[in-house]
Amino acid sequence: MSSHPADEQVMRLALDQAQNAWLVGEVPVGAVIVRHTPEGPQVVATGYNRPITTHDPTAHAEIVALRHAAELLGNYRLPDCELYVTLEPCAMCAMALMHARFRRVVFGAVDPKTGAAGSVLNLFDESRLNHHTALQGGVLAEACGQVLRDFFVERRAQQRAEREAERGAAAEADLPDPVPPIPPIPAGDATELPLEALAQLPRP
């Protein structure tokens, strides 16, 4: 899917945010909000996935950026803003963006499991909703998807290493106590037989 160079430029900023998520152990998804002003586009807020570190299931990259932008601009409606995110929004994020009246949402990689911008369902194209946000997908899709693939490869390798270490520790714990060494048997006083007695011993 073709994309505008300006969209790719902002998506690279979102990829930087995704790397920040990776560094703290979160699934690497990043978001950037751009506001259109008479002077030109302006980056208003950024965000990255933080549900694990903040113990907040709603702290997806889009929601984190959206909260920052709304607070900074002093309004829960952001009709002159566009959001760029490295992964297709889920239903929660899609509805939040439409409630905020975003003019456009741009995403990178598709999410075949929870994507709500066309993969599982398309809330942005739901005619019964009272607001319709323009949608653009597939911007730097390969780069956005590769970050996620690399992250999960690393995570699976770490999990395997942890399981192997746990198995090794368990095996060591199950080993029987070592057998104490057998003390040497003390030698008794040697008895020297006279030659006459040796001569009477049976021969083989």
Image (cartoon, helix red, strand yellow):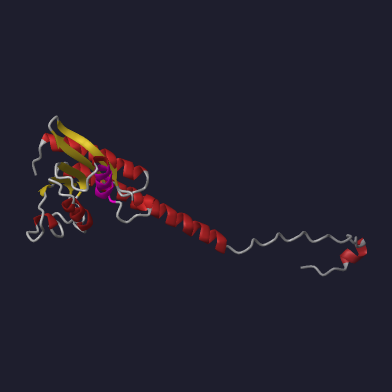
As for residue 62 lying within the magenta part, the answer is yes
Which residue is at a point 36% across and 52% down the rendered structure image?
A: 52
Which residue is at a point 24% across and 43% down the rendered structure image?
A: 74
In the image as oriented, which residue stretches furthest toward the front? 74
Nearest the eye: 19 or 106:
106
As for residue 134 lying within the magenta part, the answer is no
Which residue is at a point 21% across and 44% down the rendered structure image?
A: 144
Q: Position of residue 19 (x, y in %)?
A: 30, 41
Q: Position of residue 141 (x, y in %)?
A: 17, 44
Q: Quadrant of residue 15?
A: top left
Nearest the eye: 19 or 170:
19
Q: Is residue 33 left or right of residue 191?
A: left
Q: Is residue 116 left or right of residue 192?
A: left
Quadrant housing the C terminus = bottom right
Question: Does residue 73 lie above or below 125 as drawn?
Answer: above
Nearest the eye: 176 or 109:
109
Nearest the eye: 72 or 81:
72
In the image as oriented, which residue stretches furthest toward the bottom? 202
Q: Is residue 107 left or right of residue 153?
A: left
Q: Position of residue 30 (x, y in %)?
A: 26, 44
Quadrant housing the N terminus = top left
Which residue is at a point 26% across and 40% down the rendered structure image?
A: 72
Looking at the rendering, the stretch of residues picked out in magenta corresponds to 60-71
Q: Main secondary structure of the magenta part?
A: helix
Q: Position of residue 132 (x, y in %)?
A: 9, 52
